[in-house]
Image (cartoon, grey):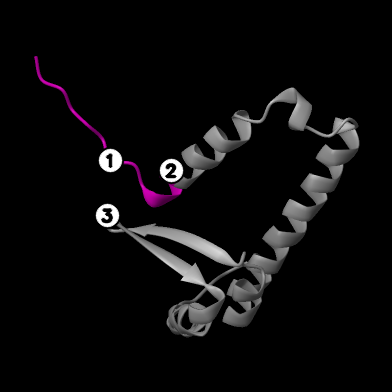
Amino acid sequence: MTVTYRSFTARGAQAFVLLALFSCASPSERPADSATATAADRAELLRLHERARAAHLQHRAEWLVSEWADTIFSLSHGSVSVGTKENRARSQAGFQEYLDASTFQA
């Protein structure tokens, strides 16, 4: 019998991890008024999405970096790196190079 393994893309792996984390929350950890919380969460996600979209279209790496958490774990090419406030400027410079070399269409 032959077993074929398919590799996850980074985006697929991130989506899986997020889904796994959010599905682990117990009902007691969820807000009592889940409709309000859901609407507020949705509004915040839409705001973050629009901010990231505008940052790409206007080539503004500082807008992307300003929304980051204090610590970020990044998985790329089989290795894990940890981004912190201290090394954020280096990451911003890398994003700016990427944005400057890219063309985005709305």
Which quadrant is the C terminus positioned in? bottom right
> Which span of residues is magenta-colored?
1-13
Q: How far apart, in angstroms, are the residues tagged by discs 1 and 2?
A: 9 Å
Provide residue 81's location: percent of width, then percent of height.
Answer: 38, 64
Element class at badge 3 = loop
Q: Are discs 3 and 2 less than 8 Å apart at CB?
A: no
Which quadrant is the N terminus positioned in? top left
Above or below 38: residue 4: above
Provide residue 8's location: percent of width, then percent of height.
Answer: 34, 42
Of 50 and 93, nearer the camera is 93
The mark found on residue 101 in the picture is: none
The mark found on residue 7 in the picture is: 1
Q: Are discs 1 and 3 less than 8 Å apart at CB?
A: no
Among numbered discs 1 and 2, the one appearing first in the sequence: 1
Q: Which residue does the numbered mark 3 point to in the structure image?
A: 78
Q: Residue at point 64% right, 66% down?
A: 53
Q: How far apart, in angstroms, are the residues tagged by discs 3 and 2?
A: 14 Å
Amino acid type for the residue under numbered disc 1: Ser
Quadrant of residue 101 within the rendered picture: bottom left
Q: Residue at point 36% right, 47% down?
A: 9
Amino acid type for the residue under numbered disc 2: Gly
Q: Which residue does the numbered mark 2 point to in the structure image?
A: 12
